[in-house]
Amino acid sequence: MAEYFKPQEAIAPAEREQQLMAALPEQLGYASRHCDYFAHLFEGVDLTQINSREALATLPITRKADLIRLQAEQPPFAGMTPDRPSGRIFQSPGPILDPECDGHDWWRMGQAFFAAGFRPGDIVQNCLAYHLTPGGFIMDSGAKACGCTVIPAGPGQTEMQLALIGSIKPNGYCGTPSFLNILLEKGREQGMDTSSITKALVSGEALTPSLKASFEAADIDVKQAYVTADLGLIAFESVSGEGLVVAEEIIVEIVRPGTLTPVPEGEVGEVVVTSFNRDYPLVRFATGDLSAIMPGASPCGRSNMRIKGWLGRADQTTKVKGLFVHPEQVERVRARHPGIAKVRLVVTRQQENDVMRLLCEVDETTRPQLDIAAVQASIRAETQLSGEVALVAPGALADDGVVIEDQR
């Protein structure tokens, strides 16, 4: 039986690096020839000479935070894709549009599922959303690339999900760690048997030590994957506590936030990815996520570089229950309700679940007229998430530019 999903996962690091750098000039040339955005971005650059990490670090960075503006100026994908139809168009919160094209394991997720122990014949309950956001399809494609059968369950509807587990008895789960925890807790409360699930691949949220311990107590082997809607799989866990192995067919840099400059090994910086996907050839794409390179190789034998996993955000954008929430969305909520002078979205974690609370500065004359239920409806309309609302006095929120305060 194969030890790795792809044989190149175990090749010598120097050989992988040589292959990536040899292929880089052609990939950059392809992006420049077929994508308006990169043709303009690389104008005047001799791309045939971009064949090393040092040369790559001289190219401009495209930031995820800029996609909202860039896509609004040139829909749907800001000229970053070739002029060809996409298999699907998703709209992630922001809004940010993401393409998916036809093809086996298009998001490269098979590597992560294989490392998490998924094999042909496994039945996987997929609890990421299939509606508008690509999370459900990303997980779906990776599980099927490993020969698994997928239950497209999506999030929520806990009782129905528990009934599915009881009748179909899937042995695998994929989705957010918090929802897996909800299923296990509700199952215990209602006397439902969830013991068929023995393995899980989680993403979209941090896998906290307390959650990890509760899954281990339930005899579930849980691994995590670092995935974005723009790039697909970036890195994945193969051995618990040993960091995340960078996926094949991408180049990962860790750069000092706000600069083009890669940081030394071990220093925390922003994750920047160059993808060899011809359908969406992102070059030096800054994810906004912070991480750091770990020394050495994984004990599992995979030889690619490792990163420490998610260490925070370089900007105020944050992820709540697997969905990004952007400052622009919070401001649009405020603008819908003229009586609100200033807002701050505070994100906390309570009983292993993400909680959003919108603090709204409202003066005494406006307070009686403000419809809190309407503000909550605006939060859901903008973010696809529920949020609490609290009214505070004028001046209660500091003038520090913070729109989203992540306290987790």
Image (spheres, rainbow, N blue to C red):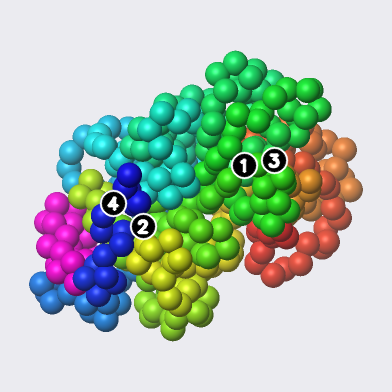
Give the spatial CA distance, label 4 vs label 1.
Answer: 25 Å
Which of the marked residues, 2 or 1, is nearer the chain's N terminus? 1
Q: Secondary structure at mark 4?
A: loop
- Name the residue that disc number 3 marks: 218
At label 2, the amino acid type is Ala
Mark before the other along the chain sequence, 4 or 2:
4
Q: Which residue is mark 1?
A: 220
> Which of the two discs, 4 and 1, labels the residue nearer the N terminus?
4
As for residue 23 lying within the magenta part, the answer is yes
Give the CA distance from mark 4 to mark 3.
31 Å
Q: Residue at x 41, y 71 (%)?
A: 297
In the image, is residue 404 above or below residue 25?
Answer: above
- Give amino acid for label 1: Ile
Distance (Cα) linking label 4 and label 2: 10 Å
Write the start and end of the magenta stretch as one range.
17-41
For marks 2 and 3 on the same chain, the one whose residue lies earlier in the sequence: 3
Q: Nearer the viewer, mark 4 or mark 2?
A: 4
The answer to whether one can see residue 129 in this image is no
Q: Label 4: few (<14), some or many (≥20) within 10 Å? A: few
Residue 370 as seen in the image, left or right of residue 212: right
What's the residue at 83%, 47% (across, down)? 391
The residue lying furthest to the bottom in this view is: 264
Can you give x and y, in whole percent of width and height, for residue 99 in the image? 32, 40
Which residue carries the number 4 mark? 6
Q: Is residue 100 above or below residue 156?
A: below
